[in-house]
Amino acid sequence: MRIATTVFLTDQTITPVRLAQELEQRGFAGLYLPEHTHIPVERTTPYPAGGELPPEYGRTLEPFSALAQAAAVTERIALGTGITLVAQHDPIDLAKQVATLDHLSGGRFTLGVGYGWNREEAEDHGVEWGSRRRAVHERIGLMRALWADEPTGYEGRTAAVRASYAYPKPAGGAPRVLFGGAPGPRLFAAIAEHGDGWLPIGGGGLTEALPALRAAWEEAGRGGEGPQIVPYAVRPSAGKLARFADLGIGEVVVQLPPAGEAEVLRTLDAYAEFL
């Protein structure tokens, strides 16, 4: 099983360069980074995990810049976002960022996609909260048009681009697109139509959820090996990883602390027993 990592990198934590180097040297499979542009001080949206919002949410590094640094000092580890708040981006600019990072890293990038939970953050970006899911899906469609081999246009209600020359292209065609979000018919239909798989936070409840996701995949006429399932932000244990393996899962993303170099490296040492 491939074991990748995720962490809230901030201006107070280990740097992307040092972390990426240590991950590659130790045999970890990848690095996924989250995204928040800002956290409004006056906020009515509750923290989804409950309690007070951890301070690292307001200090998060911009993930594409951090992943570019990681790519420059490594050759093997996968690079990804977990997740990109697609509705908060200009999709033409985002398509260029993704294509450039994938091109320069030799095809190592995975685009994790999320709809967002912080209404105030999204509204500062001009996002209409009730239609953000449509906006995300249409932005993905637009980006896929720009990543296509031949000039391809896209026309949606919230996003459009005329057929264009857009280089560089992602190294191996469109990068893998994995959706975050809670299980349910709406998310599973979106994955089947717009994505390649699912990033379930924590990985709990997969035994019950996976049949429904696979049914949605088949109903959408998607073939191949089915949706890719990558449990995300997992606190690993031998039993948990064995259960994932029994479900046919080949990649897990484990959670690192948003801390300085010494604490992060101690955690990597502890997780190394699972490699």
Image: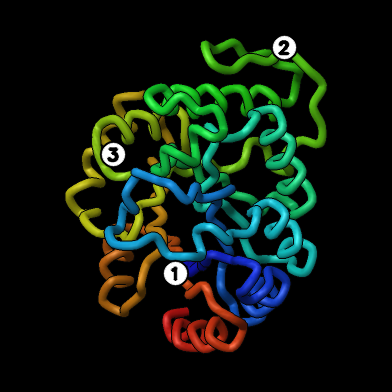
Spatial CA distance of label 3 from label 1 is 24 Å
The percent coordinates of residue 167 (x first, y second) are 82, 32
Q: Secondary structure at mark 1?
A: strand
Q: Residue furthest left?
A: 208
Q: Is residue 197 visible?
A: no
Q: Which residue is mark 3?
A: 213
In this view, 33 is above or below 137: below
What is the three-letter code of the residue carrying label 1?
Gln
Identify which residue, 60 or 21, lies in the foreground. Answer: 60
Res 206 quadrant in image: bottom left
Q: Are marks 2 and 3 in contact (CB under 8 Å)?
A: no
Name the quarter where the N terminus is drawn. Answer: bottom left
The tag earlier along the polypeptide, 2 or 3, is 2
Q: Amino acid at mark 2?
A: Arg
Q: Nearer the viewer, residue 268 or 108?
A: 268
Q: Amino acid at mark 3?
A: Leu
Using a 10 Å C-alpha cutoff, classify the residue at mark 2 as few (fewer than 14 neighbours), some (14 to 19) or many (20 or more).
few
Which quarter of the picture shows residue 175? top right
**Left or right relative to 217: residue 91:** right
Residue 198 on image: x %, y % = 39, 46
The residue at 74%/68% (across/down) is 74
Query: Disc 1, disc 2: CB below 8 Å?
Result: no
In this rendering, is residue 52 above or below 216?
Answer: below
- Residue 183 lies left or right of residue 166; in this view the side is left
Is 192 placed above or below 26 here?
Answer: above
Q: Which residue is mark 1?
A: 255
- In percent of width and height, residue 96 lies at 74, 35
Question: Do residues under tags 3 and 1 come within 8 Å of each other at their CB atoms?
Answer: no
Nearer to the camera, 178 or 63: 63
Residue 44 shown left or right of residue 103 in the figure: left
Q: Label 2 belongs to which residue?
A: 162
